Image: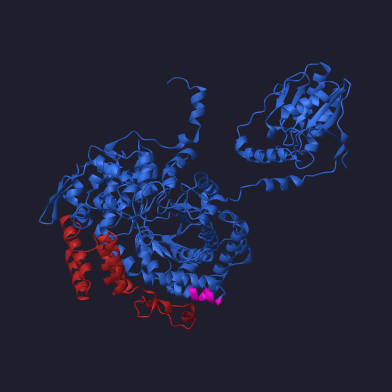
């Protein structure tokens, strides 16, 4: 082993190197596409029955093969579909002339291996186009996780309402303590109803308990119905394709929306990949999802996303999995769920193509709460990232399903949600919450901010809910009796939706006016540029107007706060013959509209330092406002020409400064202090000293270019554009410079 | 107008009716005919498997929650013998749930073939 070198020690310390990267190993299933053990696509139909599929004869079929062969394929299309060249089909997926309906029709006749082989040919940009075209619902959407470490019902409700305010249309909760589940389901449902009409709510727990909660109306959809790509792992998951098909029908029989969960890498993680690639095994899952009659699939790695991420092409395969769901004509809830990397760059890279393409649910669990409170484990996107995500939507002009929420509105919703849960739990005899707990939950950014939370409360409440058979109708009555009529109406509307059944159709969500958007009511009609989903003007404004944006007027208002009468006009500027005279020439807006520099110092403070620095060198500073140019070089040169010493300091009101000399050209200067946000009092003092030394012909102190690794330009360039605009307004061609006097401060 | 499993029209499921104590769990349960209608919609939108699911679901509306849970449990791996599953299928047939009965019989056959049931 050779000794390490600094460059590699430095690289090793970067966060991406916390991630695991695997040498591809097909025997362990550690390969994204095309394992040597993946079967050759094939399909033989004899007398209307599939007798061979993907190189396996019927006698060799395992449970998955049998179910897919008997229920999953459109045999009328199969001969045509199986005969299509893999590359030809891949091209159809990105060809705007070939409709979604047509590729979906053909995919219906393709075996898992056939579809896997064709989709493996798509490159990333092609996956983006194919996803844009093939997703089921025209309008994209997003799903939130709402959980916390203590199953705190008040915090769950406040956070569910907050998630609604940010635009999520599905909310998924779960429990660190299984027994708490019914309490969580009710708390999140109430919070969701405070936040918005039509929010779908699920509580992810073991299959049977989840179904029970659905039957009692405590949740409005289900998602944790897991499928696996090999028979052994499927059975280890304590189900079969038939039990899952029955479960799927059971949900529908109670009017409850349901999707299944799968995802590449799960089988490898559980040691049962049978030597097959992640993508082929996922192709079996997706074919099975269609075969059992589920309306949709949550896939794209999910809990095993980092396993896929560990192998070459793995991240691409995750997106291809999502596309496969779309081609099976199902709702695609596209992963971006469990955090797949410690690196901010890698996790963004993993999501980004899906984000710009748009899907039915971009995240199958955006952690709307902080990472530490996510009881599924940290998500790919979390409360820490909501502003990032909103900025990304704005950057690309795309609808990622989220919107800006105003602070007063979120405060109102959190208050109402926490109070509603307190009142309902009290009315139903489930728990009594002290005021301190309520207040902490309303204000909390996470469960660490709620020290009053008592872990026994949700547990005993949940037990009472189960034992006394409380249903959503009881919750609705309690809400109504406690004065929450609006929320009672909203939850009742969700029960009516179960009776109507329209939201059982593929990719259904509710709008805030309780319209169902689905494959049926809002079909994706993308057919190339100028077609498909375009945000409405109102929605586009929502995407564009993030809370951090500032106008020139906003900036003018901020500057006015720092206005002072210490900088006063004192007639016309004059020429001096005093060799100690150094002119500090300031920009046109100085002392009119702009009062504070980008570093946070006021202009007056900067001037004080400059004057003091000159005085240290035995020079006399004189302030002149240049009125006919905003160019700093010319401002400094104008000052130098008025100065008896021939030395001028140019100072823009935003803080940028230089030293100029009368005989130089405008763009040449003696010293430039260009990074205004980093200039502190000491820097202006030194600048004054150096200008004095230039005036005396002495040697100035060399100035180091201030350095920072911060994105200085990102932080200040927007402000600079506004400041320059204000400077220009204050500038008049041909106007003579003014003399200014800085009077002593109080 | 869509009616609930109880026969009550869905637009009569109002908060006033809840206040009056008129709404029972059956008033917020989906009617089998509604599921059959959704099956037709799914079929027309290119998903015959979803349609088949809705048709099985229509059958299951007739079963109690407990019975549905019990049949789900019976279909899980190594819970039932072939005879157990056949008995369930007979029960389902008798209740008019013929598509679900067929699914259970298929399961029995597949489980036997893969040694998950004897």
Residue A227 is left or right of residue A665, and the answer is: left
Q: Residue A38 lies in magenta, yes or no?
A: no
Decide which of A318, A30 is in the foreground and name it: A318
Q: Residue at x 23, y 59 (%)?
A: B78
| Chain with colour blue in the figure | A
Indicate the colour of chain B: red
Image: magenta residue range: A476-481
Residue B83 higher or lower than A107, as above or below: below
Residue A16: image location, x then y, percent: 47, 35
- Colour mode of the rendering: by chain
Decide which of A74, A460 is in the foreground and name it: A74
Dominant secondary structure of the magenta stretch?
A: helix
Residue A391: image location, x then y, percent: 54, 46
Residue B62: image location, x then y, percent: 29, 75
Residue at the far front: name it: A734
Residue A187 higher or lower than B96, as above or below: above
Instruction: Give residue A273's quadrant in the image.
Output: top left
Residue A624 is left or right of residue A265, and the answer is: right
Residue at the far left: name it: A47
Q: Quadrant of the N terminus of chain B?
A: bottom left
- Examine the rendering and report whether any part of residue A33 can be seen: yes
Q: Quadrant of the C terminus of chain B?
A: bottom left
Decide which of B82, A726 is in the foreground and name it: A726
Residue A210: image location, x then y, percent: 38, 63
Decide which of B115, B16 is in the foreground and name it: B16
Q: Residue at x 42, y 55 (%)?
A: A139
């Amino acid at each position: 082993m050779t000794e390490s070198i600094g460059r590699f020690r430095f690289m090793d310390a970067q966060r991406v190197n916390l991630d695991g990267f695997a040498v591809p190993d097909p025997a362990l299933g550690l390969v994204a596409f095309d394992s040597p053990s993946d079967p050759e696509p094939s399909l033989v139909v004899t007398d209307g029955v599939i007798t061979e599929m993907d190189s396996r004869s019927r006698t060799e079929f395992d449970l998955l093969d049998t179910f897919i062969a008997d229920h999953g394929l459109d045999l009328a299309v199969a001969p045509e579909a199986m005969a299509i060249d893999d590359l030809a089909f891949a091209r159809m997926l990105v060809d705007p002339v070939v409709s979604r309906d047509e590729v979906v029709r053909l995919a219906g006749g393709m075996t898992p291996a056939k579809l896997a082989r064709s989709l493996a040919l798509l490159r990333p940009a092609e996956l983006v186009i194919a996803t844009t075209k093939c997703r089921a619902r025209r309008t994209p959407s997003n799903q939130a996780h709402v959980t916390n470490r203590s199953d705190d019902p008040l915090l769950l409700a406040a956070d569910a309402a907050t998630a609604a305010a940010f635009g999520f249309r599905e909310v998924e909760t779960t429990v660190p303590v299984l027994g708490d589940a019914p309490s969580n389901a009710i708390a999140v449902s109430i919070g969701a109803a405070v936040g918005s009409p039509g929010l779908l709510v699920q509580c992810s727990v073991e299959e049977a308990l989840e179904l029970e909660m659905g039957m009692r109306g405590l949740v409005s959809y289900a998602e944790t119905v897991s499928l696996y790509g090999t028979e052994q792992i499927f059975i280890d998951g304590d189900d079969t394709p038939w039990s899952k098909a029955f479960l799927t029908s059971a949900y529908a029989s109670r009017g409850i929306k349901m999707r299944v969960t799968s995802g590449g890498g799960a089988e490898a993680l559980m040691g049962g990949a049978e030597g097959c690639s992640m993508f082929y095994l996922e192709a079996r899952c997706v074919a099975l999802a269609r075969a059992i009659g589920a309306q949709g699939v949550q896939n794209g790695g999910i809990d095993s996303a980092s396993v896929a991420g560990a192998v070459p092409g793995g991240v691409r395969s995750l997106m291809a999995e999502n596309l496969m769901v779309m081609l099976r004509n199902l709702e695609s809830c596209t992963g971006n769920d469990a955090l797949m990397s410690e690196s901010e760059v890698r996790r963004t890279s993993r999501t980004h193509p899906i984000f710009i393409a748009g899907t039915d649910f971009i995240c199958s669990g955006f952690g709307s709460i902080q990472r530490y409170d996510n009881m599924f484990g940290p998500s790919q996107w979390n409360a820490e990232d909501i502003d990032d995500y909103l900025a990304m939507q704005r950057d690309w002009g795309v609808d990622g399903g989220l919107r800006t929420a105003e602070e007063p509105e979120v405060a109102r919703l959190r208050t109402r949600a926490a109070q509603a849960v307190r009142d309902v739990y009290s009315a139903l005899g489930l728990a009594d919450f002290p005021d301190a707990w309520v207040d902490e939950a309303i204000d909390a950014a996470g469960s660490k901010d709620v020290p009053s939370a008592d872990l026994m409360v949700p547990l005993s409440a949940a037990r009472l809910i189960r034992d006394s058979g409380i249903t959503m109708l009881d919750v609705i009555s309690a809400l109504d009796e406690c004065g929450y009529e609006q929320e009672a109406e909203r939850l009742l509307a969700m029960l009516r939706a179960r009776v109507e059944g329209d939201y059982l159709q593929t990719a259904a969500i509710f709008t805030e006016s309780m319209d169902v958007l689905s494959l049926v009511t809002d079909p994706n009609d993308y057919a190339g540029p100028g077609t498909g989903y375009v945000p409405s003007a109102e929605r586009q404004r929502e995407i564009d107007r993030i809370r951090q944006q500032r106008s020139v007027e906003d900036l003018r208002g901020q500057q006015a706060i720092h206005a002072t009468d210490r900088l006063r006009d004192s007639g016309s500027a004059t020429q001096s013959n005093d060799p100690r005279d150094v002119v500090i020439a300031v920009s046109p807006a100085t002392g009119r509209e702009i009062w504070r520099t980008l570093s946070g110092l006021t202009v007056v403070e900067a001037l004080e330092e400059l004057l003091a620095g000159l005085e240290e060198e035995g020079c006399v500073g004189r302030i002149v406002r240049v009125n006919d140019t905003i160019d700093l070089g010319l401002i400094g040169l104008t000052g130098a020409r008025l100065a008896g010493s021939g030395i001028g300091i140019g100072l823009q009101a935003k803080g940028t400064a230089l030293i100029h000399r009368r005989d130089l050209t405008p763009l040449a200067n003696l010293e430039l202090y260009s990074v205004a946000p980093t200039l502190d009092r000491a820097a202006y003092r030194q600048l004054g000293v150096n200008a004095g030394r230039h005036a005396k012909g002495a040697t100035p102190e060399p100035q180091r270019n201030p350095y920072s690794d911060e994105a200085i330009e990102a932080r200040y360039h927007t402000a600079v554009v506004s400041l320059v605009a204000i400077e220009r307004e204050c500038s008049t061609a041909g106007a003579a410079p003014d003399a200014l006097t800085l009077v002593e401060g109080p | 107008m869509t009616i609930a499993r109880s026969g009550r029209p869905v637009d009569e499921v109002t908060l006033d009716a809840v206040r009056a104590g008129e709404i029972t769990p059956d008033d917020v349960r989906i009617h089998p005919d509604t599921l059959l209608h959704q099956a037709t919609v799914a079929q027309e939108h290119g998903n015959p498997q979803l349609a088949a699911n809705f048709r099985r679901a229509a059958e299951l509306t007739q079963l109690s929650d407990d019975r549905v849970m019990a049949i789900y449990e019976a279909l899980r791996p190594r819970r039932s013998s072939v005879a157990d599953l056949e008995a369930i299928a007979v029960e389902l047939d008798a209740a008019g749930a013929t598509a679900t009965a067929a699914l259970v019989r298929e399961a029995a056959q597949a489980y036997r073939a893969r040694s998950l049931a004897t």
